[in-house]
Structures are given as C-alpha cells and as structure tokens.
Image: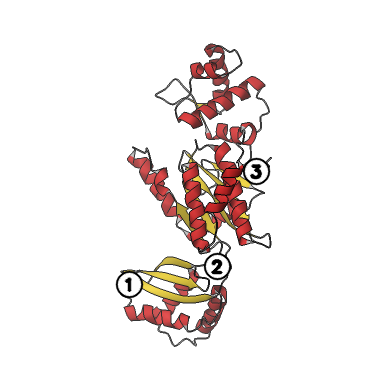
Amino acid sequence: MQQPPKLTAGSAGFTLAGLDNRSATILRELVELYIHTGEPVGSRSLSRRLPLGLSPASIRNVMADLEEAGLLYAPHTSAGRLPTDRGLRLFVDGLLEFGDLGEAERESISARCAASGRSLQETLGEAGQMLSGLAGAAGLVVAPKGEAPVRHIEFVALGPGRALVVLVAADGQVENRVIEVPAGLPASSLQQASNYLNARLSGRTLDETRLAVSGEILANRTALDALTTQVVETGMATWGSGATGGSLIIRGQAKLLENLDQLARVQEIQALFDRLEAQETVLRLLDLAQRGEGVQIFIGAESGLFSTAGLSMVVSPFRNGQEKIVGAIGVIGPTRINYGRVIPVVDYTARVIGRLLG
C-alpha cells in the first residue's frame, strides 16, 4: 500500500475542534461536491447524498452555523453555499481523503519523467506539462541551479533598452534571461561583452566566472568601456549569486484562463504570470516548498505570492543525491482543484525527480 504524502499547512492550520461529527460530515460533502461541480451547493443536494437521514431544513441550520463560523459563504446569485478559503483549509487539513496511485499510474509518471535522451530542463518541462494535464491547472517547476561548467554566453539585442542573455552549460542545458541595457547601446558592446566573458569561462561554473569577472572589474583590469562593463555586470547579476533554484518552468498557463469571462479576472491571472517570471518569485517558491516535510498546500493568499482570489498552489520540494533540496514542483490552479488526486501525484512526481537527480 502506498504511503499517504506528508502534508504541511501553508499557514496556521484550522482544527476540527468545535465541529461535531454532523457538521464535519456536511462540510466535507459540500466541499467535495463544490470541487466536482464548481457550483454553489444547496441543502437539498446534500440531503440526497448524505446518509445521515437529515432533512434539508436540518442541513440548512448546520450550514448557517458553518457560515457564521466563517467556513461557508452565500454568493449573491444563489441560495446554495460555497466554502471560504478558511473552509477549504479545514477540509484539506482534517477532512480530505486521499486517492491512491495505482501501479500503472506510478509507472506512467516515471516513464513521462524519464531523462533518457533529454536534458534535465526538457525532463523537468515534461514533468510540469504532465502535472498540468493531470490537475487541469498550471504546472510549475523550480529547476535546480546549474552547477555544470559554462560553455558559452551570448548577448543578443531585443530592441531599445533590452537584451537577451543566453547561457549554454557544458551538459547542454540552455537558460535565457532578458535584461535591461543602456538606451542606444551599440551592437558592438553586446558582442564585446560576449567575447570578454567567453574568454574567461575555461571550464568554470557560473559562480566561478562571476567571482573572476567581479575581481577584474573591481581592479579595473577589464579594458572594457563603461557601457560594456555595465552589460557584463547586469548579465552576471541576472542569475543571482549563490542562489538555489535556477529558473522557473511554467506549463499549461492557458488552463488558468479557461472559463474566465470577466476582463478583470483575465488581467489578474496575466498579472500573476508576470510575477511568476520574476527571479525573486522563483526563490520565494523554493523557500515556501522548504517550509516543512512533504507537500505544501497554499489556499488563496496564504503563500504571499499572489493576492488573486480563487487560486490554490500545491508544491513539493525535490532533493538531489546528497538529500539537499535543489528544486520544487507543483501546480497553481483554482481552489476547486481535486486535492485528493493532485496531492499524491505531486508528491510522487517530486520523488521521481529526486531519484533522477540522485
């Protein structure tokens, strides 16, 4: 029998203290029905599903108590009830029943994540795409920071004030970053910056190259003009120094935009994507994943990453062969994602990635 995944609450968890068995049963059934349909749940629907022999009127009284406790709320357009973020947190922490991954499912996940013939970046991207499809949400992977020697660095002009930094590692991994450059910077300065850095790689890692270049710049031994020196410093800084977690891979973004007919909601989701692209968000995601053992669940604004209502994040860290946390994998989706299904899938996928890195 597969062991259930370890869970850590995204914030201080709410306990079941104060809820009798009938109230807890009604809350669990209501949340599960909401996750299945996405619609407000009425007392009559619950009375047909619950084996308690309660009338709709009795269930309405319990629902009113749960609403007063801040666990349910009533939308303006319906007589039914929906769970609040607090109600969902209570459900996840104390009432959720996990699905069990069968042997065929575990073999399928392992096969999708197999690294044979692919770079690590491609393997992690496939894992994120797989989670997106299984969860009906956006798949997220915080990829490990490359520690292989750097083979080549290139600066490519994108337009006024912007350039692309392309880094190719000795193991074939490619990372791209967009940086700001001085307005009116000549193309020759980008080429000079590329030549200068490539001449100093010689089997060094990115951190080793950064230290060597910083020393030369401080000692004024670069023979670079001021604008080119600024490009080199910006290009080196964009990967951060000593940071864990190299980049964020996002798959299935369109799933968060499905069924959104309000322009304001579309703009909120697009703003979320913009925040996810920021490097500090990558580090924040990894920090959140390391808060405890196993899978982390963040409902609504609990993660501090976004204030967008109606979203949840399920994320788990993965470790290398030295048992050091080097990345994280998970999903961001609507609060009505199937937690009982998604949590064990995220947990097992993180374990598979960890075995590959080991």
Of the 4 image quadrants, the one containing the N terminus is top right
Q: Secondary structure at mark 2?
A: loop
Q: Nearer the viewer, residue 325 or 121?
A: 121
Among numbered discs 1 and 2, the one appearing first in the sequence: 2
Above or below for 277 versus 148: above
Q: Earlier in the sequence, mark 1 or mark 3?
A: 3
Residue under label 2: 146
Q: Which residue is mark 1?
A: 183
Q: Nearer the viewer, residue 33 or 280?
A: 33
Residue 5 is marked as 3
Indicate the secondary structure of the residue bearing disc 3. Answer: loop
Residue 326 placement, left or right of 44: right
Does the image show residue 40? yes
Where does the image place residue 87, in percent across and percent down from the top left?
Answer: 56, 31
Q: Is residue 307 visible?
A: no
Q: What amino acid type is highlighted by mark number 3?
A: Pro
Residue at 34% across, 72% down: 157
